[in-house]
Image (tube, helix red, strand yellow):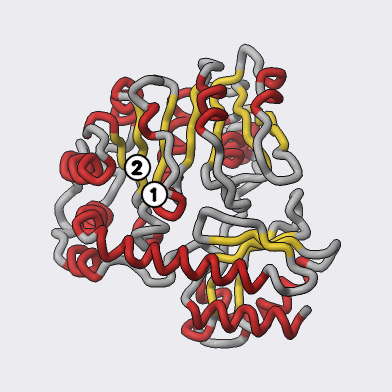
Amino acid sequence: MTLKKIENLVRAHLVDVETYDAMDAPEALAKRAGISEDQIIKLNGNENPYGGSPDAVAAVAQVPLHIYPDPNQLRMREALASYTAAQPENIVVGAGADELIDLLFRLFISPGDRILDFEPTFGMYSFCARVSGAEIEYVQRDSRFQIDVSRVTEKITNNTKLIFVTSPNNPTGNIVDEDQVLQLLETGLVIVVDEAYFEFSQTTVQHLVERFENLIILRTLSKWAGLAGLRVGYGIMHSKVAKYLMGIKPPYNVNVAGEAALIASLKDSEYLLRNVEKIIHERERLFSILDRIAGVKPWPSKGNYILCEFGENESERIYQELASKGIFVRNFPSSRLRDCFRIAVGKPEETDALIKALKEII
């Protein structure tokens, strides 16, 4: 039998698929700047500068690594139900919210189906669409990065299944009004509201879940709880949808370390939410300073990050010079945000170092 070329066996739309633009690891960033890892200032991933709860660290150290995790997620769903005031049957836990996004595509999308995506926004939606063979209809945000719901109806076809809305939007930081979400829900399509930064905004449409079977809320413990490295996220949705997702997820999708860290973090939420308050305070201080620097336009944000806009062709130069000093932010060289970069809110001393470097460069 003649051996076939492997590329001829790969699904056609995946042969040259556009991959997700992920961040380099700290080791690679340090090597690029010619410094040690402990010297870099990493403000490109919206990570929590204070880390996770010490109780979560201790809990992870005690997990039985030889035992499979609970496929039914009973303890995690109970803990999240207590934290969110939802019911356990309305909750599904994933290996990060990213896994839940992928599962939603598996559940609702067939090749050739369409999704609506409000650009600019989080790149995982369009990435999962490309992998699943879905068509993407981009609805551009206005000059202030707000969504125009009136433009949605003209984009909907018989093949449209999913609409993704991020609130606060990443990377622009603005909130979607509840009235806009209600208008989207009236389309009858599946509306996914990504509230990854809920603890920083305290704005949610969770209370609409029981009214609308087509509403799915996504959240994560990566940001407020500092568990980005463990990949733990969850969704709040109608029990019918939760049952479907529980049926198609990998049985042991959240590992025992993630489970232990989630439960310990929720028990220690007061400690973590005090750190959230520190980050919010530092976000406002950072915005105030940036707003006084000529040539920099910071956009107001309800997340743990600030989008900064610069003059034409200035963003990439400033980004590269910051990187040479060991300060890393998130740039968007090939999009509508090519003259912008996003700064994650760090500790006060990291803000001070960033501002000093920016003033030297500009």
To which residue does mark 1 refer?
Answer: 220
Residue 127 locus on image (x, y percent): 59, 41
> Are the residues tagged 2 and 1 within 8 Å (C-beta)?
yes
The local crowd at label 2, few if under 14, some if 14 to 19, many if 20 or more residues have their Cα within 10 Å, is: many
Question: Which of 226 and 294 lies nearest the eye of the viewer?
Answer: 294
Residue 84 locus on image (x, y percent): 28, 42
Give the position of the C terminus as an image quadrant: bottom right
The quarter of the picture where residue 224 lies is: bottom left
View extreme (right): residue: 312
Classify 41 as above or below 69.
Answer: below
Give the position of the N terminus as an image quadrant: top right
To which residue does mark 2 refer?
Answer: 234
The residue under the point 64% across, 79% down is 355
- Quick check: 312 left or right of 336? right
- Residue 58 visible somewhere in the drawing: yes
Classify 200 as above or below 190.
Answer: below
